[in-house]
Each structure stands twice: as C-alpha cells, then as structure tokens.
Image: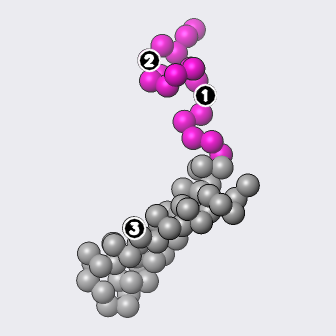
Amino acid sequence: MSRSGSGRPGGGGPLLTQRAAVVFLLAGLAGAAAGVLAALAGSAWPVAVSAGAGTAASAVLFFKEIID
C-alpha cells in the first residue's frame, strides 16, 4: 500500500537523519541547561530564555561541526 499523504518527497524515508537528531538533542539539552542556570542565578525569565536560546543556536553550530 502506498503512503500517498506523507508530505515528503520520495515516500517513507526518515524526517531527520540520525546525525541531525543527535545534534538537535544535544543543542536542546545545552540550551535548557543554560536557561535553568541563568534562572537560578537570579536573572529574569526573559533573560534566562534568551540565554538558553542563544546557547542552543550556538550549540547547533558547534555539534554540527564536531559530530561526524
């Protein structure tokens, strides 16, 4: 049976590669840790969220380069 409504060209392949999933997982964990640490240090929640988001963005670039 064909999966005609999958929304991806080429059929039923994975949405993300295993490498991309690991990169995003590690970046999310690093961003969450930075946000929690900023919040525990007494920063306001918008500052803590911004610190976490900035860390996550930088971590994507970092882990993309080191994970082969």
| Residue pointed to by mark 3 | 53
Residue 29 visible from this viewpoint: no
Quarter of the image with the N terminus in it: top right
Vertical relation: 21 (above or below) 41? above
**Residue stretch in magenta:** 1-18
Vertical relation: 61 (above or below) 1? below
Q: Position of residue 10 (x, y in %)?
A: 57, 20
- Mark 3 and 2 residues: CB-CB less than 8 Å, in contact? no
Q: Position of residue 41 (x, y in %)?
A: 37, 91
Question: Disc 1 to disc 3, how far (Cα)?
Answer: 30 Å
Mark 2 nearby-residue class (10 Å; few <14, some 14–19, many ≥20): few
| Left or right of 12 on screen, residue 7 | left
> Image quarter for residue 61?
bottom right
Quarter of the image with the C terminus in it: bottom right
| Residue pointed to by mark 1 | 13
| Left or right of 15 on screen, residue 54 | left
In this rendering, which labeled residue sits more in front, label 3 or label 2?
3
- Mark 1 and 3 residues: CB-CB less than 8 Å, in contact? no
Q: Nearer the viewer, residue 14 or 68?
A: 68
First along the sequence among labels 1 and 2: 2
Q: Amino acid at mark 2?
A: Gly
Give SS at disc 3.
helix
Mark 1 nearby-residue class (10 Å; few <14, some 14–19, many ≥20): few
Give SS at disc 2.
loop
Q: Is residue 7 magenta?
A: yes
First along the sequence among labels 3 and 2: 2
| Residue pointed to by mark 2 | 5
Q: Position of residue 39 (x, y in %)?
A: 35, 83
Residue 14 visible from this viewpoint: yes
